[in-house]
C-alpha cells in the first residue's frame, strides 16, 4: 500500500514539472520578436541596425612618390624591400594624425634654430628630420636614458663635450646638443661614406653597424640586414621628410596661425658663480621660475652649485 502511495506522489510530481515547463515555453502570438521562445514554424521579427547619420569615412592609401631621397641619396625604387619599408613608415606617419600635426607645429619654432647650426657645420639640411624621428622635437627621455632633442646617452654626450650632472644637463640645451650631433654625424659620414649609413649608426652605434657591414659584405643601408628598429629608422626619417615637405598631398592642412611661433625675445645673462635659488634669481630678473625653466631646460635643479666656476649663458625672456 505504501509503495502504491509513493508511486502516486512521484507521478503527481512529474506531472507538475511537465506542466510548468509547458507553461513557461508557451509563446503568445503577440509576443513574437520580444526575446521569447518561438515554435519551429515561426520567424522571429528582427530589428534593423540604425543607419548612421553621417557618411562613412573614406580612408585612402597615401600615394607613393615617384622619387624619395635623404641628403641627396635616393631611395632605390627598384628594390621592393626598400620601397615597402618606406611605404610602411609613410602609412604609419600619415595616420598618426595628432603626432604628425605636432611635428609641423613644433618645426616652425625649432627648425630655425637647428638649420643654421647644421649649415655652419657642413651637415645636410635633411638631418633636421632625424631630430623629428628621434624625439618629435621635444626634450624626450627614452627608457634607456637618452635625453633631449638629439637623444644622447650620458657617455656619448660627455664624449662630445656636453656637461651632464645633477645641476646641468646640456643634452637639453638645443643649440649645444645640435652642435654635438653634427660632430657625431660628420665623423660617421667620413668613416662610413654615406649619410644614410651615418644616420643608421646614430640609431645603433657606429661600431655595431660596421660589424654588420663587414659580416654581410654590405655597402649601403638598404642592402644590410639589421635589427628591426634600425631597419625602419632611415625609412622613417625619409617618410617624415616627405610628409613635412608636402603636407597637403598627405592630408595635412595647416595655416600660419596653427603653427607654434618662435620663442619670444630673450636676453642672456652671464653667470660665473653659484645660484642659491632659481626662484629668487627669476624674480630678480623680472620673470617666473616656469619661464626660466622653459628658456633654459638644461638647468635641471632649483639651484646651481657651479663648484668649478664655469661660465654659463642663461636666457631671460623680455617683453616686446
Image (cartoon, helix red, strand yellow):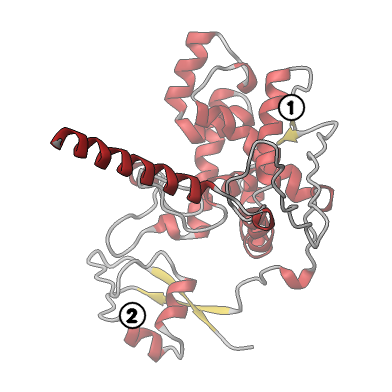
**Can residue 189 be seen in this snapshot?**
no
Report which quarter residue 127 is drawn in: top right
Between residues 44 and 92, which one lies in front from this camera angle? 44
Q: Position of residue 295 (x, y in %)?
A: 49, 72
Taking the image as shown, residue 82 lies to the left or right of residue 318, namely right
State the SS at label 1: loop
Compared across the picture, whether 53 is left or right of 210 comes to right
Q: Which of the two discs, 2 and 1, sits closer to the camera? A: 1
Residue 308 tag number: none
Labelled pair 2, 1 in contact (Cβ < 8 Å): no
Identify the residue at image location x=39%, y=85%. Answer: 282
Query: Where does residue 208 sit, x and y in percent of width and height?
Result: 43, 23
Category of crowding for the residue at label 1, using alpha-carbon neighbours closer than 10 angstroms: few (below 14), some (14–19), many (at least 20): some
In x, y percent, where is residue 229? 51, 31
What is the CA distance from the residue labelled 2 to the residue labelled 1?
A: 49 Å
| Front in this rendered view, residue 115 or 235 | 235
Q: Which mark is residue 75?
A: 1
* Residue positioned 60% across, 49% down in the render: 132
Q: Quadrant of residue 272?
A: bottom left
What residue appears at the point 72 percent right and 53 percent down from the top-left corner?
A: 47
Residue at screen point 61% across, 33% down: 234
**Element type at marker 2?**
helix
Q: Earlier in the sequence, mark 2 or mark 1?
A: 1
Residue designated by label 2: 278
Q: In this rendering, is residue 240 above or below 272?
A: above
Asked if one can make out residue 320 in the rendered structure from this viewpoint, the answer is yes
Pick whichever, 156 or 134, lies toward us. 134
The image quadrant where one finds the C terminus is bottom right
Residue ranking furthest to the front? 1
> Where is residue 50 shown, x and y percent of the image?
75, 57
Amino acid at each position: 500500500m505504501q509503495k502504491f502511495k509513493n508511486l502516486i506522489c512521484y507521478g503527481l510530481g512529474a506531472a507538475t514539472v511537465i506542466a510548468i515547463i509547458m507553461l513557461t515555453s508557451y509563446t503568445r502570438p503577440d509576443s513574437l520578436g520580444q526575446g521569447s521562445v518561438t515554435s519551429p514554424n515561426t520567424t522571429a521579427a528582427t530589428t534593423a541596425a540604425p543607419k548612421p547619420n553621417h557618411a562613412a569615412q573614406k580612408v585612402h592609401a597615401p600615394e607613393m612618390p615617384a622619387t624619395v631621397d635623404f641628403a641627396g641619396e635616393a631611395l632605390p625604387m627598384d628594390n621592393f624591400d626598400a620601397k615597402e619599408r618606406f611605404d610602411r613608415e609613410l602609412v604609419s606617419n600619415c595616420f598618426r594624425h595628432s603626432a604628425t600635426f605636432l611635428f609641423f607645429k613644433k618645426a616652425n619654432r625649432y627648425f630655425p634654430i637647428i638649420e643654421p647650426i647644421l649649415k655652419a657645420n657642413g651637415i645636410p639640411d635633411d638631418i633636421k628630420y632625424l631630430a623629428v624621428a628621434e624625439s618629435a622635437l621635444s626634450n624626450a627621455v627614452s627608457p634607456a636614458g637618452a635625453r633631449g632633442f638629439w637623444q644622447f646617452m650620458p657617455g656619448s654626450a660627455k664624449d662630445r663635450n656636453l656637461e651632464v650632472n645633477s645641476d646641468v644637463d646640456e643634452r637639453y640645451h638645443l643649440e649645444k646638443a645640435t652642435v654635438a650631433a653634427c660632430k657625431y654625424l660628420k665623423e660617421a659620414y667620413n668613416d662610413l661614406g654615406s649619410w644614410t649609413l651615418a644616420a643608421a649608426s646614430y640609431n645603433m652605434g657606429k661600431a655595431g653597424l660596421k660589424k654588420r657591414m663587414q659580416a654581410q659584405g654590405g655597402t649601403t643601408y638598404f642592402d644590410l640586414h639589421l635589427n628591426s628598429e634600425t631597419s625602419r629608422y632611415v625609412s622613417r626619417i625619409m617618410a617624415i621628410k616627405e610628409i613635412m615637405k608636402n603636407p597637403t598631398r598627405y592630408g595635412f592642412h595647416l595655416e600660419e596661425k596653427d603653427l607654434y611661433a618662435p620663442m619670444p625675445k630673450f636676453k642672456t645673462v652671464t653667470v660665473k658663480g653659484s645660484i642659491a635659488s632659481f626662484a629668487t634669481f627669476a624674480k630678480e630678473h623680472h620673470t617666473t621660475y616656469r619661464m626660466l625653466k622653459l628658456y633654459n631646460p638644461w638647468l635641471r635643479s632649483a639651484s646651481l652649485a657651479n663648484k668649478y666656476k664655469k661660465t654659463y649663458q642663461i636666457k631671460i625672456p623680455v617683453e616686446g
